[in-house]
Image (cartoon, rainbow, N blue to C red):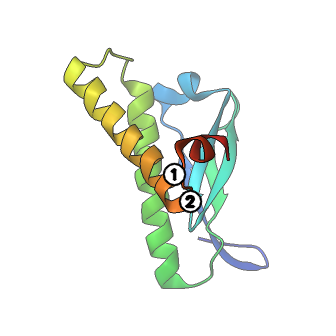
Amino acid sequence: MGRGESFNAYFVQRIPADVKSSGAGTVLQIPVGDRLVPVKVTEHTTAIRVSLRTGDPNETKVRQAAVAAHLERVWRSLREKPRSLTLKEAVALAGEVYKTFAGALEDRGASSGRERCCQ
């Protein structure tokens, strides 16, 4: 959807009624291209509106799909009640965190453990 004098497209999606109250007071980080765009949700916010920062029709379709998928995950997480992780889930999650952390340290190329932790 285009707007005014700008050639950039933007994304608009109504906030579902069942999650509106639980989402109020949060700041959503919406992925648009290679950036995260903060969008504050208040009790008066009726829709999420964000510029897709592109005028290219093909890129617009890709970015709209990515934003829509992200918001669907947000709405789903607001609908679901928090739950405890099983031991297996906790260990798997800890393993992913470790791999990400260790990979980032290796990418820095530090030679000792102390240098890796303290940089």
Task: Quarter of the image for the N terminus: give it.
Answer: bottom right
Q: Count of labels shown?
A: 2
The residue positioned farthest toward the right in the image shown: 5
Residue visible at 29% across and 19% down? 85
In the picture, the disc for residue 108 is 2
Residue drawn where x is 33% and y is 16% of the image? 83
Assign a secondary structure to mark 1: helix
Along the viewing direction, whichever of 22 and 83 lies nearer the viewer: 83
Q: Position of residue 47 (x, y in %)?
A: 61, 45
Q: Estimate the x, y position of residue 49 in percent, counting from the top left.
A: 64, 53
Q: Secondary structure at mark 2?
A: helix
Which image quarter: residue 87? top left
Residue 3 picture quarter:
bottom right
Residue 42 coordinates in the image, percent (x, y): 70, 31
Residue furthest to the left? 88
Q: Are marks 2 and 1 in contact (CB under 8 Å)?
A: yes
* Amino acid type assigned to the residue bearing label 1 in the image: Leu
Q: Is residue 26 left or right of residue 103?
A: right
Q: Which mark is residue 105?
A: 1
Query: On the rendered structure, is 26 left or right of 33?
Result: right
- The residue type indicated by label 2 comes to Arg
The residue sitting at the top extreme is: 84
Q: Quadrant of residue 35?
A: bottom right
The reply, left or right, for residue 64 in relation to residue 95 is right
In this rendering, is residue 52 above or below 15?
A: below
Whether 17 is drawn above or below 69: the answer is above
Residue at the (51%, 83%) spot, across then down: 57
Q: Nearer the viewer, residue 100 or 64?
A: 100
C-alpha gap between disc 2 and disc 1: 5 Å
Q: Residue at x 65, y 57 (%)?
A: 50
Q: Position of residue 93 (x, y in %)?
A: 33, 33
